[in-house]
Image (spheres, grey):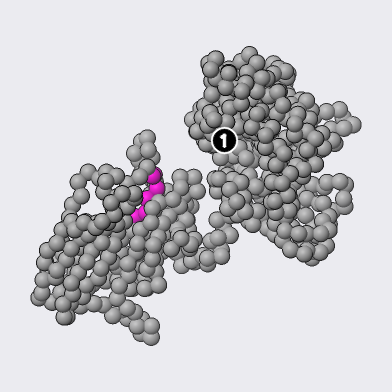
Amino acid sequence: MRSNARKKGYKVHLKIIWTPIGPGDRSQKVLVEQQNTTGVFYELGPVTHDHQGVYTCHTVPQPDTFTHDWHDIIWVAVVTVALVSPVLPVMEGDNVTLSCIHRNRTTKIIDTGFQAFYYKNGKLMRQSDKLSANVNFRSVTKDDEGLYKCNHLAWGSSHDSYLTVIGTVDRLTGTVERPPGEEGGVLESTMWKDNIDTENGVEAQLYSPVSWREYFDQMEDVSVGPADSRESFRVYKAGTCGPLLVLLHGGGHSALSWAVCTTAISSRVSCRVFAMDLRGHGATQVGQCDDFSTQTMSRDVANVVQACYGETPPPTVLIGHGVGGAIAVHAASNMLLPTIVGLVAIDVVEGSAMEVLHSMQSFLKGRPKSFKSMECAIEWSVKSGQIQNLESARVSVVGQIKKCQVEEVVSPERASPVVDVVVEGNEEFYDQNHINVKENTTPEVDLSDNQSVFNWRIDLSKAEKYWDGWFRGTSNLFLGCNLPKLLLLAGVDRLDRDLTIGQMQGCRLAQNVAL
């Protein structure tokens, strides 16, 4: 750590002060104090949590002396993303590069080849390109001074770092008035981009939808049932060999909810991923779209898998979350597929599920009825906490809402009347093969001259009569499945009576697992 000051022929009184961060003693401590013409130095030993705090440089200026107090923050935490920025002040007119780095906790390899989002004083300001986590500032000014941090969509945010800018620029001539003895050009940039995104543009791009192609190899509409009443189920596939992982999403979501998880699984094991939109969800088109019984939905899973892989599919592991987990339990319990070799239920507990069902209607009524754009829906999903992972929201929300024509819009959250026609305005991200999918046989309309909103694809409130049947008895069914099984929960405190007994008898449970 270095404190720097320049002066004409005089020594400058400098000291570095440390203020601890966190609970306990917050009193300041002077680490080093001396008079010098060039600066003072202080070296920290092996950094531990005890070194966490704010480090500041203080000076006692004298006539004809230029000094500048600065501060830096040292965090010691389990983080993998860090912002590399100048520690010492930079001059107005200098070129500055900020770098976002990611350090793999296992391999210790440092990576900068990803897209990073940069924040200044807590507000999103710009982003890097997709192949480099650097952003560059040409000829910085005092307006660029502030607290910066960077963010990666999957790995999280760095801690804050303060950028100090000194000197002034003559706005008429463009020349820099530098303090005595200071020289410019300390950080040259070789990757400057002239097309700086505006704040609104960056914000919109942050919540823009991402194509399913980034996560799956193939999208297919699978037809099942008699020739005179065929039903179409949307499925997404990844991988070509190994066991078959059938992924079943939760209520109100779609198969795209598994996109980020699919990438994580495929990078670790050789397998075939098969994610499907359940009845009434996503892009699935069925005759009885209001039949959400566990018998019908579990039979759907078996029919679709066998339509794709024949009467004897590859060794199959059923993996379901929420309602999808309950469907997986029913399908496995009834051995609807002859090659099931494993069952994974995520956040499926009969007792706690039955307790919260009475509040489901209030929850559904409390969320927005519609959105003015896909980006607004993604932003709401993240900021409301409905989806914790921004990357997952960008790829999956497309499967939860649909674009509809409205004749008269009162507000973005109150649109009436709505002509229930799905217009795949984001077909690149959702559906390349089926555009203008019609519901309720309403004639196709041209939205170019009309207003439109995005509504939920499924009204879960209309499925209330099936809620009880989704979860009642699932704990005993899960425990009774005679095959390898795994239950993933946020904590064992969520277990109901039957599952608690099962845990005591040695059933395999996992807790604190986040997908």
Closest to the observer: 28 or 434?
28
Q: Is residue 467 above or below residue 313?
A: below
Q: Position of residue 288 (x, y in %)?
A: 84, 35
SS under mark 1: helix
Residue at (34% x, 79% y) in the render = 169
For label 1, the crowd category at 10 Å Cα-Cα, with few meaning under 14, some 14 to 19 and many 20 or more, is: many
Q: Is 10 in front, or is 476?
A: 476
Task: Verify whether residue 332 appears in magenta.
Answer: no
Q: Residue at x 74, y 46 (%)?
A: 457
Q: Is residue 25 left or right of residue 210?
A: left
**Main SS type for the magenta part?**
strand
Q: Is 457 displayed left or right of 487 in the figure?
A: right
Side (left or right) of 335 relative to 289: left
Residue that mark 1 sits on: 262
Residue 238 visible: yes
Q: Where's the N terminus, which quadrant?
A: bottom left
User: Where residue 329 sits: x, y (%)?
Assistant: 67, 24
Q: Residue furthest bottom?
A: 172
Return the residue nearer the eye: 394 or 193.
394
Q: Does residue 240 show up?
A: no
Q: Residue at x 85, y 36 (%)?
A: 287
The residue shown at (52%, 67%) is: 198
Instruction: Give the camera-side residue of 226 and 34.
Output: 34
Where does the magenta region start and end?
A: 79-84
Does the magenta portion include 81? yes
Q: Amino acid at mark 1?
A: Thr
